Amino acid sequence: MIINDKKIWIVFFLLSSFFSCIQKNESNLNYVDPSIGGVGVILEPTRPTVHLPNSMVRVFPNRKDQLDDQISNFHLTITSHRLYKVFGFMPVCGIVNADIWNRRYEYGAEELTPYYYKTSFEDYNNSIEFTPQARSGYFKLNFIDNSQHFIRMGVFSGVGEIRVEGKRVITGIEEFAGMKAFFYAEVDTDISDTKYQNSVDKKKLLIELGNKPQVVSFRYGISYISIEQAKQNLQNEIPAWNFDSIKNNAFQVWDKAFSQINVEGGTEAQKRVFYTALYRSYERMVDINEYGKYYSAYDHKIHETDEPFYVDNWIWDNYIALEPLHMILNPDMATERIKSYIKMYEQGGAMPSFALIFGDWPAMTGNFSATWFADAWFKGLRDFDLKTAYEGIKKNSLDATLIPWANGPKTILDDFYNENGYMPGLHPGEEETVDKVSLPWERRQAVSVTIETSYSDWCIAQLAAELNYQEDEKLFLSRAANYKNVFRVDKGIMWPKDKDGNWIEPYDPRFADRMYFTENNAFTYNWSVKHDLHGLFELMDEKYGAETTLDQLFREDLGTSKWKFWYKQPDASGLVGQFVMGNEPSFHIPYIYNYLGSPWKTQKRIRTLLNAFFTDNYFGIPGDEDGGGMSSFVVFSMMGFFPVTPGIPIYNIGSPVFKKISIDLPNNKKFTVIAENSSKANKYIQKAFINGKPLNKPWFTHDEILNGGTLELIMGNQPNKQWGSNKDDSPPSALNYQN
């Protein structure tokens, strides 16, 4: 039988479509709901961001939150999580008048996925679709009415311009935070006219497309180098007018990422929470290499290289869970992210804090690139220049300022810290004397700076030992104990000191806010000594005892009404007593019971917190999600383990919500967690095995994941208080710990 080419193509197309439908129906992507957390609890909502994993182009509808019934516009990308959108885009209809330039449009039902977005507009029933590539995007507009149709475009920053070139090409440039973004776009129908709101500045325009029902496609490339490079990015990624092909590619990319972790058991709601959290964990960092070159804001040069260059990392938020998660799932990418930080140091002379597209943003406190690097190194990620990395983090600790939200050389406060081992606090009403301290909001955050610098210095000491820098190791181990200088033994809690070494009075550990702490109070920072928990317990044991103090954290009264508490500390959301589920410094705290011989309390707390605060609805995130910072906590905790102390390559065992979790590792091995009988009631571990051998300690190593194997937990509805209770088998966390 002879079959011509056309018949072969038709058969191939039908078979491909059939198998694609089967794959989509079975994909873990079906559990992702980007609307989860879309109404912020006090602070920021999540956004239904459409993008490829860790890629430049990130798009979502611009509105107040998921309950806002109007969309003002879309953007061609955001440059950083929650910061600096560029190039507004919106299909609009009707008569050109003053209203059309700023009008917000009511929208109908949305189709929300990581790889595809669609909605219609209730005024005209026109619809919009979007699907991404890494450095480009594709909008499809379906105009079904007979009014005049336009694409409304503009710049968000107020600095830049957009131009129409010929009948089907639009280009633009927008300046933001000392950077420039560029785009090159094409439409698949002729532009009949162009109307600028102001013909002088060319910042906002209407691109007229006619007044008949029509489908209009708009494809574009983004660049931080030039318009010509944006054009090249578009041509490389979306060379033809085929929306469904680009959409299917985006699906395939996400499906591959989501097939790496498979779960069995649990509820449908728990699966939606889990896989949505996994999706959020792939927003940052983003690779801005544009086919062999990238622009760096760290030396304001274009660099030619085939290596990725990753930006957009809020390391204060991400070192505890997001970066460790990718060290398991994507170790090569995790290494490239670190190498990007090292390049930034070489280019700009300082190791970044928050490494954004436009340069270092010295937000928050701590020297957590040191923690990140140490964690990677001791988990076997070695393909980066440790000596140069060490040089940068040492410089940050000894020669740069520790003042929150500040960059530059050390100040008199830093000299004081280096000499006395703590950041001095001011008495209530005492006037600030150091110009670099951010006023009136951020302040010195003196106790947090001391504790977090102690931890990062411990991490530097571990790396100094690896490099055989013996004097440095001794120095930084000594500095790692500085947290003891702000722990008031007679009160059993962290407490600020003034420059004369006196405890500051009056002082209420509930309401110290940013004078002494970062986004939280003493009840949270009491437990931030991740590198020396056993040393902390010894201090606590002199007053109430560590376990009693930890129990009380979850029961402690706020001391005032919630609204007054949140007025001073809006980040302290997701409250259980004084425990704060909605902010990153608390993530490790429920696991600390493992170190105290009571892992059953960790199991109870973790399940309670997951059930209470991480739900599959608009209110399902208890605080700022921070581009994967909070979601990665959810991924780890729902799988049943968590990295309490990055820098020590072990994981604490919690309470898995699924009966089986399988992780396909990049080395072609598989790590499986089996939680037999796991259910809402059966949250307590009765006994455990690792690779068939009894496990009587509540932790395991990173190597035990990498080597593949099975962690088996037998679950029940009553705590087994004997399992993991031997304190000699508690997880390692000590100043003298050696990797």
Image (spheres, rainbow, N blue to C red):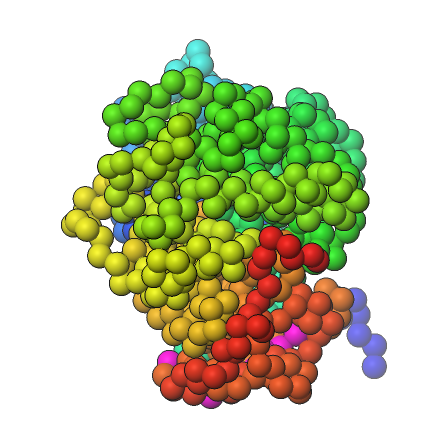
Image: 206 above or below 454: above
Q: Quadrant of the N terminus?
A: bottom right
Dominant secondary structure, magenta: strand
What stretch of residues is rendered in magenta?
A: 671-680
Give 121 or 705, whichever is nearer the viewer.
Answer: 705
In the image shown, does 435 or 507 lie closer to the viewer?
A: 507
- Where is residue 232, by image quadrant? top right
One can see residue 25 in this view: no
639 to the left or right of 311? left
Point 39% across, 66% down: residue: 547
Q: Quadrant of residue 222?
A: top right
Pick the residue in front: 375 or 539.
539
Residue at figure coordinates x 66%, y 74% from the top left: 671
372 is within the stretch colored magenta? no
Q: Residue furthest right?
A: 2
Q: Is residue 280 above or below residue 350?
A: below
Quarter that holds the C terminus: bottom right
Residue 285 vertical placement versus 689 (above, below): above
**Residue 599 image position (x, y, % from top left):** 46, 74
127 vs 565, left or right, is: right
Residue 676 lies in magenta, yes or no?
yes
Residue at 22% across, 57% down = 557
Q: State whether residue 298 appears in this view.
A: yes
Rendering quarter of residue 109:
bottom left
| Percent of width and height locating residue 192 | 47, 28
Q: Position of residue 64 (x, y in %)?
A: 31, 42
Instruction: Tell me: 80 left or right of 336.
Output: left
